[in-house]
Amino acid sequence: MVGLAFAIAAARSGLSVVVIDAAKPAALTAENFDGRVSAIAPAPRRFLEAIGAWEWMAPHAQAISDIVVSDGTVMDGAAPFFLHFAEEEGDGGPLSHIVENRYTRLGLARAAENLPGLTQISPNRVVQQDVSGGAARLILADGRVLEASVIVGAEGRHSPTRDLMDVRLTQWEYGQHGIVTTVEHELPHQATAQEFFLPSGPFAILPMTGNRASLVWTEKAEAAPHFMALSDDDFADEVRRRFTGYLGHVAPVGPRFSYPLSMQLSSHYVRARRALIGDAAHVVHPIAGQGLNLGLADAAALAEVLGDAMRLGLDIGHESVLERYQTWRRFDAFAMAAVTDVMNRLFSNDIAPLRLLRDAGLALTGRMGAAKSFLVGQASGYGVLGKQALPKLMRG
Ligand SMILES: Cc1cc2nc3c(=O)[nH]c(=O)nc-3n(C[C@H](O)[C@H](O)[C@H](O)COP(=O)(O)OP(=O)(O)OC[C@H]3O[C@@H](n4cnc5c(N)ncnc54)[C@H](O)[C@@H]3O)c2cc1C
């Protein structure tokens, strides 16, 4: 998603881009490839609009007008203190949109179709990269040889391009899995996203189009295989135990997916002729639903930096050019990784004094204007540097 978004933005700014993906295009958009949805914040949505992908995604997007964050347990439901964000507190318009990743990939694929300057080669892999001299040279699995000014590593958390760069990777496992499935429910969701903090981790209910919602159920790593192996009926019972009844009768539909959760931060995003974007550069806990949003901001920023350098006649692969991208984006991802890490540690347990403290914290944050607008800004995709520092493509 992040790689193709970057490629479209770069090609539209006049650069010549080749996208090499290991997966077949049809596999990337198949129903069983990725069961996740993403909460697309307003700033990255404007980027997707600007590159022509949003028009294809919009019919499948569910606008979110309210977000309710609450402490709670499986048996008791939501605690009395909770944090509520309403549309009026945002920037005008919905707080975010929930879109199935499948439709985001389809939207990007449509926007990339017949775009001058963009060539897609898939399925294929880079088997050798060489960045010595004035250009990067790549050898593909089928023997093809490509030359380029810059290699952009967008291969997700196991990025081979990153492995070839001299970078340090700070990483740890959360000992949690994100179990993802779709449910159909009896009562309308009223465009409200809910996040309950259960002892095993956050349990998010993200409204989709129609009377459907996507669950992101964070479970201890050792317990997740048990839930994944349950029969459909037993799994449905477990899901229902975690709902408080506000959506009426709930039934899981479609496949279940399980993703191990980890944190990863690359010490550098650039080296001569190489740059990292998206999960290749940083992986954050999904507690705030911001991983893709961060990656799309990388894509917009890198396309802008390279486009500007090209117009000035500079070597777009020179480290001094690429460093402008790194300075722009690295702190944002670092801050998001830190915030989501602390939130997850604070909320994923059942220690009574901590529970009291965080309930008070939720209630207090709800009453503190500055703290709340900071959180709304983060959820809107403005990053720690604020709206003024957004790439132009994210400002509309
Ligand atoms: C449970 C869960 C819920 C989430 N919810 C949200 C949310 O609500 N909002 C949000 O913003 N983010 C969310 N995220 C994070 C988000 O899914 C990721 O940040 C996002 O998918 C990263 O996109 P990417 O394009 O960088 O990497 P990926 O999606 O991992 O894509 C990598 C691409 O590279 C290709 N590839 C891999 N290896 C190679 C290779 N060697 N050669 C060529 N191609 C290769 C793959 O085929 C793929 O197309 C969530 C994550 C999880 C685990």
Image (spheres, rainbow, N blue to C red):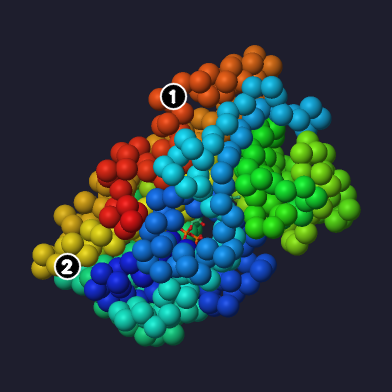
* Left or right, 139 with reference to 94: left
* Left or right, 177 with reference to 342: right
Amino acid type for the residue under numbered disc 1: Gly
**CA neighbours of label 2 inside 10 A, class few (<14), some (14 to 19), many (20+):** some
> So how many labels did they put on this image?
2
- Tag 1 secondary structure: helix
Residue 356 lies, in percent from the top left, at 64, 16
Q: Residue at x 32, y 52 (%)?
A: 395
Residue 159 lies, in percent from the top left, at 44, 60
Q: Residue at x 63, y 37 (%)?
A: 195
**CA neighbours of label 1 inside 10 A, class few (<14), some (14 to 19), many (20+):** few
Task: Report which residue position mark 2 lands on.
Answer: 310
14 or 302: which is nearer to us? 14
Task: Report which residue position mark 1 lands on.
Answer: 369
As drawn, 293 above or below 369: below
63 or 303: which is nearer to us? 63
- Place residue 37 in its image quadrant: bottom right
Disc number at residue 202? none
* Left or right, 275 with reference to 192: left
Badge 2 residue CB within 8 Å of ligand 1? no
Q: Is residue 156 visible?
A: yes
Q: Is residue 286 visible?
A: no
Which residue sits furthest left?
A: 313
- Place residue 344 in its image quadrant: top right
Of callouts 2 and 1, which one flags the residue occurring earlier in the amino acid sequence? 2
Amino acid type for the residue under numbered disc 2: Met
Q: Quadrant of the C terminus?
A: bottom left
Residue 254 lies, in percent from the top left, at 75, 62
